[in-house]
Image (cartoon, rainbow, N blue to C red):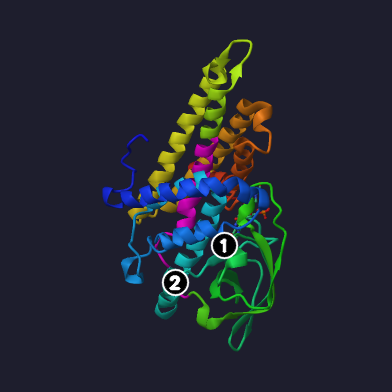
Amino acid sequence: MTPSPLDPPTAEMSWAERATVLAADFAQRAAELDETAQLPIENLRALHEAGFDVAWLPESFGGQGLSWVTFGRVLATIAKACPSTATIWLMHLGAAYGLVHMSDDDNARFFAHELAGGKRFANALSEPTGGNLFLMPLQAARPVDAGFVLDGAKRFVSGCEIADYLLVNALVEDVPAFFGITPDDTLRLVPIWDSVGLRATRSQLITFEGTLLPASRRCTKLTDEPNPIPIGLPFLSIGVAEAALEALREHARGRVIPTTGQPLADMQWVQFAAADAHVRLRAATLLAGHTAWLADQRSPMANPSSLEAKLLSNEVAKDVAALGVKVGGGSGYLKTSPIQRHFRDAQAGALMAYSAEVCQAEIGKAVMGETATAD
Ligand SMILES: Cc1cc2nc3c(=O)[nH]c(=O)nc-3n(C[C@H](O)[C@H](O)[C@H](O)COP(=O)(O)OP(=O)(O)OC[C@H]3O[C@@H](n4cnc5c(N)ncnc54)[C@H](O)[C@@H]3O)c2cc1C
């Protein structure tokens, strides 16, 4: 790997190395988990046992306060091996860290303690009608004595079947509000998840019928602490793109074209396309690394940069995976080939909020500047 100023600090390199060891094991199971659409419970447990769940929490919450640059490297390594594992883990950390940083002191300590103890978290934010605007809930919760009651649905909740806690949002008195809830029998899982890619995330629909969102579990704080999700989403796509490029290369080196007697990898069109894929992937990795570095600096530019990094990495992953299908020919189209799996997995990044088009809309507005709108 080419050294970069955006590499993990030397003191944190052991985390990147340990992720590489775990990922080698995850890669062995990835095809089967994809085929059977089973949750990667063993992988998630291994990440927890190796201390990865709490490592990016501040020391005051029992973490190690590791850098977000290291987080990016770790997440891309896991995503390259098993992107479903990486997605559930990212959502788990996003929900748990969000609850720690947005809750009052007692709840923050409680959620950090539960995370350290191996409890699992998931984000129940996206609404069937709300689409990409997952932070702007349309479903209103009505006030009752102990808090607010929600009747509604949340969908695409990755890892929800094993979640001990859900980060849920709803409109409360016309304002978006977040709660950390314990699932009870007012929640029902609707098994919609027979998806094309990221099949092992099992991102199901949840319905809420008279579910109490307790006032005592309402998030009360605004926070400047970075959330793992916007930093991590670009790295999910980067991991998929790395895997796709590797599979493409393996195939092209092994496949000899009978008319020339040369491997496919020696053909100029393949080399030109591989060069383009490699350079764009490197650019996406640097942009994602820069975003993580901005988060480490607690820069306000980290958020806008995360949209840019997500857009580029989502598109690069789709392009590299599509090139893999072209280079792979009929062999890559078989279910036994990793090429087709990478192609399917690569589509998800650009669909997940904020979608590539929403990123483009936001970046485009910033590039073009505010314009006066006629009444
Ligand atoms: C694998 C996977 C895992 C997920 N995990 C979770 C999870 O754990 N928790 C959770 O809460 N959610 C999760 N999601 C949901 C995800 O983050 C999005 O909220 C959801 O996919 C939006 O889907 P939609 O079908 O409603 O898309 P829509 O928002 O309806 O998008 C459809 C099309 O419209 C475009 N579009 C939408 N809005 C705009 C706009 N304002 N400007 C321009 N174009 C626009 C989109 O780009 C897209 O092309 C997951 C999704 C996937 C695919």
**Mark 1 sits near ligand 1, with its Cβ under 8 Å away:** no
Element assignment for label 1: loop
Q: Residue at x 29, y 48 (%)?
A: 9
Element assignment for label 2: loop
- Compared with 146, 229 (above or below) is above
The residue stretch that appears in magenta:
220-244
Q: Is residue 232 part of the magenta span, yes or no?
A: yes
Q: Position of residue 169 (x, y in %)?
A: 58, 69
Q: Position of residue 316 (x, y in %)?
A: 54, 36
Under mark 2, the amino acid is Gly
Tell me where residue 255 sits by quadrant.
Answer: top right
The N terminus - image quarter: top left
In terms of depth relative to the viewer, which is nearer, 357 or 16? 16
Kindly report the secondary structure that dominates the magenta region of the rendered protein.
helix
Q: Position of residue 313 (x, y in %)?
A: 51, 41
- Compared with 278, 81 (above or below) is below
Under mark 1, the amino acid is Leu
Viewer can see residue 351: no
Q: Is 129 situated left or right of 273 in this image?
A: right
The C terminus - image quarter: bottom right
Q: Residue at x 51, y 21 (%)?
A: 271
Q: Residue at x 47, y 30 (%)?
A: 278
Tell me where residue 341 sits by quadrant.
Answer: top right
- Compared with 17, 3 (above or below) is above
Earlier sequence position, callout 2 versus callout 1: 2
Residue that mark 1 sits on: 135
